[in-house]
Image (tube, rainbow, N blue to C red):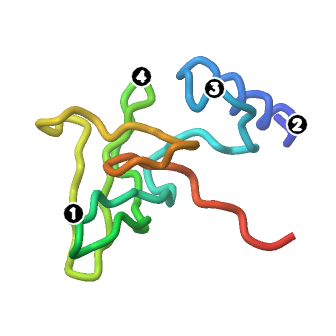
Amino acid sequence: MGIKEDIEAARARAAELGIGGRPVRPGQVPSVGRKVHYVAYGVPGKFPSVCRSADITEVDDEGNVGLAVLNPTGLFFHPIAHENGPCPHDEDGKRGGSWHWPERVGP
C-alpha cells in the first residue's frame, strides 16, 4: 500500500469513528503513543486553563481515548473507564477536560 492509500485509509477510519466532523490531516487517527494536547480545567483565580502535553494510552472501538497527561507537578491519568467518562475530543472549543491535536507551528 502506498502513501496515497494510507492517507485514504486514515481518513476513512476517522470518518467511521466520527472524529472531529471536519477534514482530517493525514495520519490523524488516534492510536496508542500519539502526542495530543489535554486542556486542564484550571482553578479560577489560581491556575489558568492551559494546554498540557499528553500521550494516548488506549483507544477503544468507538474512538474514545485514554490519556497520560504531563503536568509540572506530576502525571495525571484519564483512562477511558474514568468515573466521568472518556476524555472528549474538542478540536474547536478546547474546553477544560478535553483533548485536541497539537496546533501546527510554522509554515
Q: How far apart are marks 1 and 2 (CA)?
A: 37 Å
19 vs 64, left or right, is right
User: Farthest residue in the front direction?
Assistant: 45
Nearer the observer: mark 4 or 3; the answer is 3
Q: Earlier in the sequence, mark 1 or mark 3?
A: 3
Q: Which of marks 2 and 3 is nearer the N terminus?
A: 2
Picture quadrant where residue 15 is located: top right
Return the x and y of residue 106 as percentages of the image width and height: 80, 73
Q: Nearer the viewer, mark 2 or mark 3?
A: 3
Residue 65 image point, x, y percent: 37, 40
User: Is 107 above or below relative to 38?
Assistant: below
- Residue 21's disc is 3
Q: Residue 82: x percent and y percent?
A: 16, 39
* Three-letter residue code for mark 2: Lys
Question: Badge 4: few (under 14), some or many (20 or more) residues near its Cα, within 10 Å?
Answer: few
In the rendered structure, the answer to whether residue 106 lies left or right of residue 29 reads: right
Q: Toward which corner of the image does residue 47 lie, by quadrant?
A: bottom left
Q: How crowded is mark 1: few (under 14 residues within 10 Å), some or many (20 or more)?
A: few
Three-letter code for the amino acid on which mark 3 is drawn: Gly
Q: Mark 4 points at which residue?
A: 62
Asked if the residue under mark 3 is in contact with the one under mark 1, i.e. CB atoms within 8 Å, the reply is no
N-terminal of the two: label 1 or label 2? 2
- Circle 1 residue: 76
Task: Name the spot of residue 44 as percent of width and height, x first.
Answer: 23, 65
Instruction: Report the amino acid beneath label 4.
Output: Glu
SS label for mark 4: loop
* Between marks 4 and 1 in the image, the one whose residue lies nearer the viewer: 1
